[in-house]
Amino acid sequence: MALKIDDKIVHATATEVIMQNGENFTNGTNGAIVVSSEAIMGDLEATSMLGEIANIIGGRDISASTDATVKQLATRDENNIKLYWGTGAIEFKVVDATRYGSDAGAFSVAIGEQIGKGIVMYMLNGAIAGLVGSISSQTDLVTGDGASKVTHSLLNNALIPFGDARDSIVCWVMNGKTYADLVEAGLGIATSNVAGGVVADGSVGTLGRPVYMTDSASLAMKSTDGNDTNSNGILGLSQSAINVVESASRTFANEIITGKENIMYRIQGEGEFMLNIKGFSWKTDAGTNPSLTALATKDNWDKKATDIKATAGVLLNVA
């Protein structure tokens, strides 16, 4: 009897992997990266929220009878952008599973685990690309020229744009090379493995903030010292800097393919997710279903928050 892969098991396993890693993202980054699910229609989601009221509290003259100063309550509109993913057609020979003693359930779980991790990685790369693009659209939020290796002093300087709100930066995101440059300073030990990276405890070496380490290509940058050499970005994120929302149910389909020398099995999956970046809006004329390159392009983002301290965070460019 031909091996039949159970797409329900594949779907359930992928869901479990996504849920586990989603919890690690949220907990390990102090709530800076949030993964959630919500049914959302369309390619863009337009949201409205209250704008920040400048100087909302001030002194009051108890001897005066003049009219109070009117402070207008305004709203701001933001666009969240949706990305669509697909596995493509995954094919393999039935004999490759049966000859090694795998049953349908075990093989389905193995495939589901790989797909689940792949989905999480694509979500993460999209999130980082969007964060790099949106934050870099504001020069006041970017420090470093990409020519110097990371130091504690540069990390500290990266917090300057947030001024007295520096403590609202709750975690760092950096790649393995940058992490290695800080190892000698006593970076925290790894506490949780997440698909595509490792979360480390905060220590003096990271100014008391945890680090999410990932070799995401979206962290690749260019130096600004005139040499245009390759450099690396470090993101300093505020709480709820980005919400990655799985915006529709995942779909999986499978079939047996006959007529070839060996019976083949094919499975394919697809889904979507939306990026909601704190204080920023995707420009409508930048299009829909963007590539990672487009997400990382600063010209495709608008800052909607009145105060930069109410945005997703800061960006440090290091060698």
Image (tube, rainbow, N blue to C red):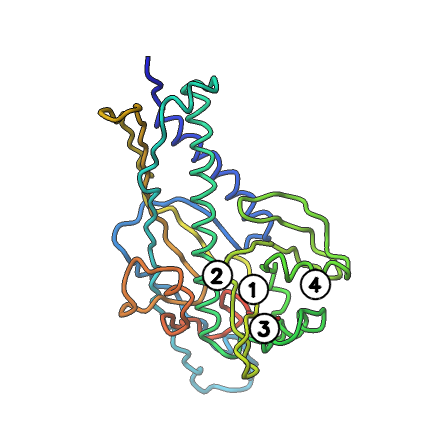
Circle nearer the N terminus (2, 3):
3
C-alpha span from label 2 to label 4: 19 Å
Label 2's element? helix
Task: Please tell me which of labels 1 and 4 falls first in the chain.
Answer: 4
Q: Is residue 282 left or right of residue 181?
A: left
Mark 1 neighbour class, 10 Å CA radius: few under 14, some 14 to 19, many 20 or more:
many
Query: Mark 3 or mark 1, which has the lower sequence index?
Result: 3
Kind of residue at disc 1 = Leu
In the picture of the structure, the residue carrying the numbered disc 1 is 235
Give the Cα separation between the discs numbered 4 and 3.
Answer: 25 Å
**Residue 249 visible from this viewpoint:** no
Residue that appears at 48% across and 61% down? 218
Kindly report which numbered mark, 3 or 1, lies closer to the viewer in this rendering: 1
Return the residue nearer the eye: 167 or 295: 295
The type of residue carrying mark 3 is: Phe
Label 2: which residue?
218
Q: Residue at x 43, y 50 (%)?
A: 122
Q: Which residue is mark 3?
A: 162
Where residue 42 sits: x, y (%)? 25, 53
Mark 2 or mark 4, earlier in chain:
4
The three-letter amino acid code for the residue at tag 2 is Ser
The image's mark for residue 137 is: none
State whether residue 291 is above or below residue 85: below
